[in-house]
Amino acid sequence: MTYVVNDKCIMCKHTTCVAVCPVDCFYEGPNMLVINPEECIDCGVCEAECPEEAITPDSLDEDGKWKALNEKYSNIWPNIAEEKQPLENYEKYSGEDNKFDKYFDEGTNE
Ligand code: SF4
Ligand code: F3S
């Protein structure tokens, strides 16, 4: 089992989750974070820290979409170990549905 970050993080990126992770297994994309499923020790501490409720156990990710996305991008994006300011205008996007299709940005990292 692992915890995963889902759609609700996109365009918000509060990063309060990062501050509590004992193994620093968050990775940062342009407009969301992901968790590396192989590094996560399933402590669950971050779940309660996210104001968007964007972090869940992967058992709630029924089709595996978010686990696959977390796995993929945690191997591409850089590690983030310190909290920082949320994205500008995060309030505007809080709670909006289907942000992945509208806004997801994988970045270039080239
Ligand atoms: Fe880190 Fe624990 Fe959250 Fe996994 S469940 S990402 S180890 S804080
Ligand atoms: Fe995203 Fe929530 Fe962390 S919005 S950056 S999962 S605190």
Image: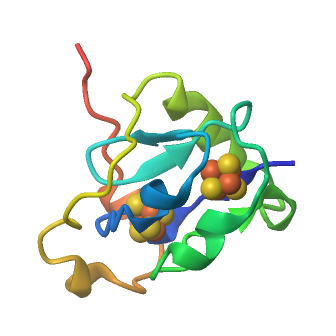
Drawn side of residue 11 relative to residue 52, left or right: left
Can residue 9 be seen from the camera position used here?
no
Q: Residue at x 48, y 71 (%)?
A: 8
Q: Identify which residue, 57 or 85, lies in the foreground.
A: 85
**Residue 81, image x, y percentages:** 40, 42
Q: Nearer the viewer, residue 100 or 91?
A: 91
Residue 65 position (above or below residue 55): above
Q: Quadrant of ligand 2?
A: bottom left
Residue 61 in view, yes or no: yes
Left or right: 91 in relation to 78: left
Residue at (30, 45) in percent of width and height: 105
Position of residue 20 measured from the top left corner of the image (x, y, whole percent): 52, 60
> What residue is shown at x 23% (from left), y 86% (from top)?
91
Name the quarter where the C terminus is drawn.
top left
Q: Quadrant of residue 58?
A: bottom right
Measured as percent of width and height from the top left, residue 78 is found at: 36, 28
Res 99 → quadrant: bottom left
Q: How does the figure colour the protein chain or chains?
A: rainbow
Q: Measured along the vertical axis of the image, is residue 106 above or below residue 108? A: below
Residue at the extreme top: 110
Q: Quadrant of the rendered structure where residue 48 is?
A: bottom right
Across and down, in percent, residue 74 comes to 52, 32
Establish if 63 lies above or below 74.
Answer: below
**Relative side of 68 to 57, left or right:** left
Count of picture labels:
0
Q: Residue furthest left?
A: 88
